[in-house]
Each structure stands twice: as structure tokens, then as C-alpha cells.
Amino acid sequence: MTESPADFIVSEINAGIFMLDRQYRVLLWNRFMAQHSDLDAETVIGRNLFELFPDLPQKWLVKKIDSVFVLKNFAFTSWEQRPYLFRFRHNRPITGGIDYMRQNFTFMPMRNAQGEVEAVVVTLLDATDSAIYQTMMQAAMRKLEESSNRDGLTGVFNRRYIDTRIFDEIQRIGRYQAAPFSVVLLDLDHFKRINDTYGHLAGDEVLREVARRVLPGLREPDVFGRYGGEEFILILPQTDLEGARSAAERIRFAIGAEAIVCGEQHIQVTASLGVASFLPPFSSAAEVTQAADEALYQSKHNGRNRVSVYPAQQSQTG
Ligand SMILES: Nc1nc2c(ncn2[C@@H]2O[C@H](COP(=O)(O)OP(=O)(O)OP(=O)(O)O)[C@@H](O)[C@H]2O)c(=O)[nH]1
């Protein structure tokens, strides 16, 4: 046997191993490093690492290596801190969303008989699979979180999410003395009759179409969701009562402007709306939604297809 088992392992292992002296000259360069850098051991040995690889983050890496020489301790870096040091290609599909091989490094002090560190041995582990897995996990988590905020039928936000957003708005006002927000509750008129006349599936399509008609008229910060059954809710950040009332009027018009076509049927739909602003003495989400609900009740009571505001004022008929 011409080669020692240790040499054989260093050469053949599926990980990068190289060794540097105090001047960052390469003393050892294994097969993995040669294959991925396209520079074989004969070319690199004796040469300065930073001349060979000008892309390396020299200042940062020198600090790391020097600390091993001085402190005589191991040092580590992971791909999560720095995705890679060497621009090595990886053999995974492009769809993984990772450009270069992700790398974990260990820096080990090699001591001489006097206990002085003469060289630093560096190992490079390919962490690309972990990185791809983590990227995929994060994307899946984001998707899951997004879908858990949505109403299954209409695709607009659900009540759970809306409740957290009202809470956020209240916090924001407390923290930054931001302008008050307003809440609009919207309830379709005689929806039971629509279900009874055209069937539940047509009723579902009406709910979807109502959401489609409301969304284009909203501003970017507005949050629109389904609050339950045939009731929707809109949060209007930094909007006073008058601004919210005119937004509600636009929505009422958008919903009732044209009949909703559902197969052979043309279904005329109207909505009643109630508006309230989060102003003193309100201090909770429940109080402001309750106020919007009272205004909504006024709209129903006064003949439907209208907008009412809290506290009670004259309401507008369509
Ligand atoms: N198709 C369908 N119907 C629903 C859904 N959720 C609730 N509903 C129906 O909505 C109707 C609501 O009826 P009511 O609360 O009596 O109110 P309304 O008929 O709209 O009358 P007003 O609100 O007083 O104008 C009920 O028939 C519910 O079954 C849904 O997801 N799909």
C-alpha cells in the first residue's frame, strides 16, 4: 500500500478539505476541492488562497483564520450566516432556487510539538440540500399561512385575519397617535330569498361576485374580508367617518349596478352597510364592530340598500 488510510480518506471523502499556513498559502488540497474549483492540487499548492480566489471575502476570512492561529480553537461558519465562500456550482435542478453550492466550514488548528498552531485545516461541507429544503419549507409555510387567512368560498380575507388586523390598527393608533380607522359592515339584502329562489350554488356565486365587485374599488391599505354568511367587513386605515361613508357608498353602487349573471339567471343584488370610526370612547375591536353593526341595523330597518353611519345620522338611499 503506497498511500496511508488517512491520506486515502482525505483524498476521496465527499467534502472539501484544504490546509493553509500562516501566510494563507495552500498546503493541502483534496480531490473535492480540485473537482469543484477546476484547479488541481499541483496548481494551487504553495500559492496564496486569496490570489487563487479573488472573489473570496478576504477581510472576513482572514479574521476567521487568524483567530484560529491565535486562539488555538476551532471556528465554524454556516451557510445560514454566509451562503458560500467559494463560487462552486452544484448539481441540483435550477428549480431549487439556489445559485451556488451552499457551504458549511470548520476551521481546525493543527499544532506542532510545541503546541503552536502551524496550519489551519479547513473542511467544506456541501449544505445545498438543506438550503433547498429550507427554502421549500419557508415557501410552503408562507402559502399555508396565506391560505389560513383566506375565506375558502370567496378568496377574500377571513374573520380570523380581519380580527387580527383590527387589533393591529388599534395598537398602531395607541403607539403612533395615527389617524383613526373606520370599519364598514356589509350585509346582502334578502339573501335567504336568493338562496331559496335560485339555489344555494347560485347563492355561493353571488357571494363570490360581490367580493369581485368590491375589491377593485379599494385602496392599497384597505382590508376586505368575509365576516360570516352573507356579511362582509372592510377596514379602512387612516380614514374618518366621512371618507368611510363615501367608500361605502361606492361599494353599495358597485354591488347593485348590474344584475349578477348566474347561468341563465340574472340576479339583482343589493347590500346594506353600516359605518363606524374608531374614536373615543371606543377602546376595543368589539366596540367599533358593534357600532358598525348598529349602523347596519339602521340601514336594514330603514328599507335596506343604503349606508348608515354610527352615531345615527340620516341615511342615504340608492
Ligand atoms: N349560498 C350561501 N348562502 C349562505 C352562506 N352563508 C349564509 N348563507 C345564507 O344567507 C342567508 C342569510 O339570511 P338572513 O340572515 O335571514 O338574512 P337575509 O335573507 O339576507 O335578510 P336581510 O339580511 O334582513 O336582508 C341564510 O339563508 C343563509 O343560509 C353561504 O356561504 N352560501
Image (cartoon, rainbow, N blue to C red):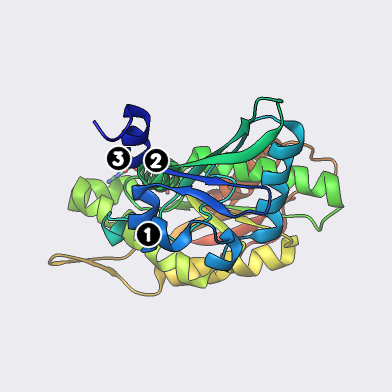
Q: Secondary structure at mark 3?
A: helix
Query: Is residue 111 something that shows in the picture?
Result: yes
**Res 12 label:** 3
Residue drawn at x 18%, y 48% is 199
The quadrant the N terminus occupies is top left
Q: Hey, what amino acid is under mark 3?
A: Glu
Seen from the viewer's position, the closer of residues 19 and 149 is: 19
- Mark 1 = which residue? 40
- Mark 2 = which residue? 130
In the image, taking residue 289 as reference, residue 213 lies left or right, namely left
Residue drawn at x 64%, y 30% is 111
Q: Hey, what amino acid is under mark 1?
A: Asp
Tag in front: 2 or 3:
3
Q: Are the two marked residues, 2 and 1, in contact with CB atoms closer than 8 angstroms?
A: no
Name which of mark 2 and mark 3 comes first in the sequence.
3
**Res 280 label:** none
